[in-house]
Structure formats: C-alpha cells, structure tokens
Image (tube, grey):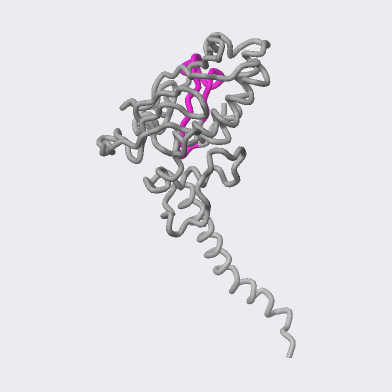
Amino acid sequence: MEGTDDDQPQRARRRWPATVLFLLVVAVTALAFRQGLITPRFNPLPDLNLSEPNPWFIDWRLAAIKNSPEVCARTLQSPHIEAREIPDGPIKDGCGWTNSVRLVSAGGVRASFDKLTCESAVALALWLEHDVQPAAQRLLGQRVVAIRSFGSYACRNIVGNPLWKHFRSQHATANAADIAGFVLANGRQISVERQWHGDGPETKFLHAVHDGACRYFRAVIGPDYNAAHHNHFHLDRGPYPVCR
C-alpha cells in the first residue's frame, strides 16, 4: 500500500534529528582533526613527505604532528630539515612548549630557532623548500641560504591589536616564527622592512613568499596588517586563520 501525501512531512521530521546528528559528528570530527586530537593509530592521513610540493590536506596533516612526537620524529627527514627534538617546557600561565624542536636549517636554508613546535618547524620547511626557494630563483636569480629572524618563543601577550592584548601570543607556546628577511647565495639581503613596498623584484619576491606561507601557516601577518608588523612576517599554526 502506497503512503499518502500526509506521510511525507512525518518522514521528513523523523529524518531531521538523524541529519542534525550526522552533521554534528562530521563537524566534531573535522575539529578534532584540525586540532591534532586524532591519535596516529586512528588517523587515516599519511605522514607528510617534505620532498613533495603541494601536499593534499596539508592543514590537517600538519595538525597531526601537534600532539604526536612519534609523527614528528618520522617527519623530520634530512636533507629537508635539520632539527633536534627538545624536552618539553611545561605550560605555566599560558607559557611553555611541548613537542618542540631546536631548528638549524630547513629547505636548504639556515633557519635557527631555539624553540619551535614541530608542527610549525615542518610548516616552515615546506614553505622554504617549495615556495621561497622557487620564488627566489624565479624573481631574484639566486637561492636563499639563510633567513633573518626575530625569534620564536617569547612568554608574552599579543601585541599590535588592542582587542587581543589580554590573550597570549602563539609565541608564548613556541608556535610562531618571525621572519625579518632573507639572505641570498651571493650575500645580498632582502629586508621586509625596507623592500615590502615598491615595484622591484625584491618586493615581488616578498609578496609572493608571504602569500605562499598561507598554504602552510594559519596566521600569516605582514606589514599590511598593522604597524607592529612593519618589519617582519609573523607565521603561526594557531587556531585563527588570517592571511594579510
């Protein structure tokens, strides 16, 4: 016996809770992946291979490193990155570090950071090897051999934005790196402060690598964001996305 037209609204009402529950499960699972809460045992995504450009599901695969020293150790592969895992500095008052490394070089670039989360170090290695180096060759005719940095770990709040000044910076957990410039193979220096504005190849290079960093980092902040970043790029793997 065929159902009547009156049965259709009832069937739709019965399906509605199941649909809402399904969408909720999908959203919670996606959030868990994004926050690196899925243990390696249950994570179907493969470890990152630093030699491969444009890896798929890059954000989630980087997030998988966040809380897993095992995935970190498997990902730190020479010659793409030279880094050593360091003991945790337990979080106190919003400051400290976990699953972090001492970074020496990445993507063939001297990149010295005393404390940097493994997640951010791997993101930096991918960016330097697959975005910075090709852009330098294409626009400047030289490879990058070193970066000039303003550091990574600092127990402090966010600066430059009064709305966020009472919140800890990603620097407070060693999850951010500040890049002031680049050194080319011939010794030439490219400065964010001096060369961000203009129309020459140095300016085009800086804008290209800034935009490229947004593929690997969730927050990429440069001179166009606010005065506090007039002389460097701030790169972090925190929860809030911004590319400016």
Rendering quarter of residue 10: bottom right
- Where 139 sits versus 65, above or below? above
Residue visible at 60% across and 29% down? 131
Considering every residue shown, the one lying at the far bottom of the view is 1
* Residue 237 x %, y %: 46, 36
Which region of the structure is painted magenta? 220-240
| Residue 90 is covered by the magenta coloring | no
Please tell me whether residue 238 is drawn above or below residue 7 in the rendered image: above
Marks counted in the figure total 0
Coordinates of residue 126 in the picture (x, y in percent): 54, 34
Q: Residue at point 50% right, 48% down?
A: 47
The residue nearer to you, when weighing 174 against 24, is 174
Q: Position of residue 232 (x, y in %)?
A: 49, 18
Image quadrant containing the N terminus? bottom right
Q: Is residue 219 visible?
A: yes
In front here: 151 or 129? Answer: 129
Residue 235 is a magenta residue: yes
Query: Residue 177, percent across and down?
Result: 43, 26
Q: Quadrant of residue 55?
A: top right
Q: Does 204 sit left or right of 155 as displayed?
A: right
Residue located at (52% from left, 44% from top): 48
Q: Quick one: 164 or 233, which is closer to the camera?
A: 233
